[in-house]
Image (cartoon, grey):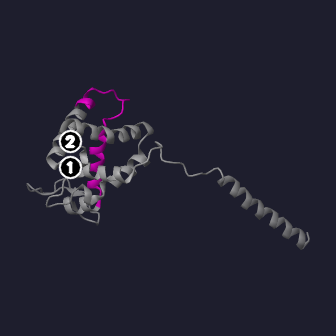
Amino acid sequence: MERRELLKMIALATGSVFIGGELLLSGCKNSPALGGSTFSEDDIKFLDEVGETILPKTNTPGAKDAAIGSFMTLMVNDCYTPEDQKVFHAGIAQLNEACNKMHSKDFMSATAEQRASLLTSLDKEAREVASSKKKEEPNHYFTMMKQLTLFGFFTSKPGATEVLRHVAVPGKFDGAYPYKKGDRAWAE
């Protein structure tokens, strides 16, 4: 085999690898969010306020300190089914409508007490729906918001380090560890 023939064969082989790889990747496009709906900045602020009403700032951080609105939007877009995404998106409007019905003002302009009473009534409604719904039916929108608020807060840095007790170094499991009344729970 001559040197020229070898170089032509190498060029042909490597060229086809580059062209073939490009051809394979041409079908890989970034797909939009699952539900096709996106969250606006106003939606994120709204969800921050809902989260802050569920877990308000006291002498410990609140849900806003954990950027709970951004967390909720990320989880809904990346992890929820399209059906659950629709329920969640519609739930934002439904929560605002419920506040208008109950207090004659939208959620963002309601007082902390009005927000708390609204969310308490929605929590009661969500529990009633959960007890009577079939397994294949979607959850109540407020159940989703509350679960995401709690999960997002207690897995965030402020929630895990300032509210729960957190040790960054893993240790052994001790099922008989002494507990004193009033101790904070442990974060992993």
In primary-sequence order, the first of circles 2 and 1 is: 1
Magenta-tinted stretch:
128-156
Q: Amino acid at mark 2?
A: Leu
Name the image quarter holding residue 61.
Answer: bottom left
Residue 71 visible at all: no
SS at mark 2 in the image = helix
Total tally of numbered discs in the picture:
2
Gap between marks 2 and 1 measured at Cα: 8 Å
Q: Residue furthest right?
A: 2
| Nearer the observer, 38 or 104 | 104
SS at mark 1 in the image = helix
Name the image quarter holding residue 121.
Answer: top left
Name the image quarter holding residue 140.
Answer: top left
| Nearer the observer, 26 or 105 | 105
The label shown at residue 120 is none
Q: Which residue is mark 2?
A: 119
Q: In the picture shown, does residue 50 fall above or below 171?
A: above
Q: Position of residue 126 (x, y in %)?
A: 25, 34
| Nearer the observer, 16 or 106 | 106
Residue drawn at 21 percent across, 57 percent down: 62
* CB-based contact (under 8 Å), mark 2 and mark 1: yes
Q: In the picture shown, does residue 120 fall above or below 48?
A: above
Specify whether residue 51 is painted magenta: no
Q: Which residue is mark 1?
A: 53
**In the figure, is residue 15 to the left or right of 94?**
right
